Amino acid sequence: AQTAVSPTDEAETLAKAAERHLIQPWPSAGEIGDEARGLIGSGDGIYVTDAEGNRLIDGPAGMWCVNVGHRRRELADALHEQAMALSYNSPWYTMNEPSALLAERIAGHAPGDLNHVFFTTGGSSAVESALRFMQFYNNVRGRPQKKTILSRDGAYHGSTYLSASLNGSSRGRDWMDIADDLVVKLSCPDPFRRPLDMSIEEFSDMLVEEFADAVKRIGAENIGAFVGEPVMASGGVIVPPPNYLPRIAAICRENDILYISDEVVTAFGRMGDVFASKDVFGIEPDIITFAKGVTSGYFPLGGMVVSDRLFAELRQSNHADAMYAHGLTYSSHPIGCAVALKNLDILEGGLLEHAREVGVYFMEQLKTLEELDLVGEVRGTGLMACIECVADRESKNPLTLDTEVGRRIDQHCQELGLLLRPLIHMCVMSPPLIITKEQIDEMVAILREGISRTMEDLRKEGLWKGFA
Ligand code: PLP
């Protein structure tokens, strides 16, 4: 006789298997190799279903990536059909149709003369490829000392050695070795955390001055690149002051410093355009890196788009035999590229316009949560937003129980049907772009209730007095 296996029994068995054998990303030493995380069983549209069968709004769209939503038949079919036609070919000696077509279409969307695409396996490998390209470019040009990379506090660029060396959070660096000698960190362009007596314009001037001073101090001849997310995502959806990015881009151009715009999160519709650098922020970088939304997470794929100008310089150098000795087994993966082509069809077929329209409504509605005492700021742009909690609005101090508040809000919201991404004292959201205004209303109502319940808990536990 067969005994029925309940979904929760199955979830427990899986949790045990994970605890015994699965290493999760970013584990702490005390739990490494001995940890299970909440099980997600299935997804459909903007929803996912957990082990108990609860349907939750996928607030972060996975990890900022499920842009066209879960369970899209067109993407599943594209994946299947490409696997049956050609599942793999070596990019070392051969090429495939989907990667050539996708490179052409991506170049068509990229700003200025960014016309050449190198495909990778995700965002870290995209940033790593761009940085290694910068090193190669300066070696070939006879400037081997021009390698310092400028990054910023609060940045996140990946988990490979060089990309991780750019990351700005101390949590990500404290116990890890990084290429400190290659990277210089500048201030986080966070208007909410600017000095209390400074206007946004003065803050922007200060950041630009800091950048210019760093160039003078280090020497332009020693700086290879600036790497920046147009909107810092994992740092807490930091939207920089207006005009700051174009001013930084101008300094880079004047000083022969490559501007690498890390659009791993902001591209493919998250901000209403295929790329945000030019269309949203008015900058023409030398290289753009992308990943995540390029396949809406249906297949691991990333890449970089590089300017004609840089390639022309390389071709005209005296080192025709110099090798950009960089490639991945899965560069130009036919299945990833086929999925990305179909994903782009969906974005171009009306979803970009939809994202632009609901993005405005999303921010307007989320902003109403600033009425709640615990909420210091709701910020964001497009379909990415962050709720930052503070213990005190005057000093803007984060809560004293810092590491807990985002998680507390997330737990309440999960009970109410919404999955968030807690980040210390913040909650981050970036729902699938297909979200409707009604679903945004549902999301905001859950957030309001989840934050209110968290405030009650904090008061009851004597951890926070509120302002009443
Ligand atoms: N760059 C940015 C801006 C990111 O947000 C991320 C990941 O969140 C990465 C790079 C790294 O991408 P991946 O995790 O695909 O390697």
Image: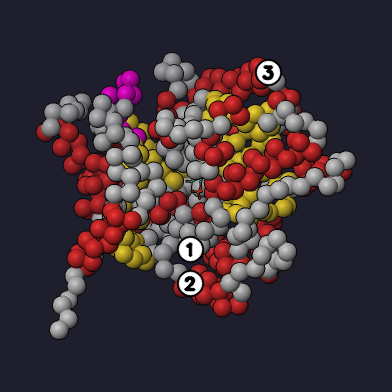
Above or below — where is 146 with respect to 428?
A: above
The residues colored magenta run: 388-397
Look at the numbered disc 1 and say if its residue's Cβ is closer than 8 Å to ligand 1: no
| Label 3, residues with CA under 10 Å away: few <14, some 14-19, many ≥20 | few
Q: Residue furthest front?
A: 20
| Label 2, residues with CA under 10 Å away: few <14, some 14-19, many ≥20 | few
The tag on residue 216 is: 3
Helix, strand or loop for disc 2: helix
Task: Say which of 16 and 346 sits in front.
Answer: 16
The residue drawn where x is 19% and y is 65% is: 9
Q: CA distance from mark 1 to mark 2?
A: 8 Å
- Overall secondary structure of the magenta section: loop
The quadrant the C terminus occupies is top left
Q: Amino acid at mark 1?
A: Tyr
Mark with earlier residue (1, 2)? 2
Look at the numbered disc 3 and say if its residue's Cβ is closer than 8 Å to ligand 1: no
Does 114 sit left or right of 411 as displayed?
right
Mark with earlier residue (1, 3)? 3
The tag on residue 298 is: 1
Q: Amino acid at mark 3?
A: Lys
Helix, strand or loop for disc 3: helix
Q: Where is mark 2, residue-wise?
A: 76
Q: CA distance from mark 1 to mark 3?
A: 45 Å
Callouts 1 and 2 close, C-beta under 8 Å: yes
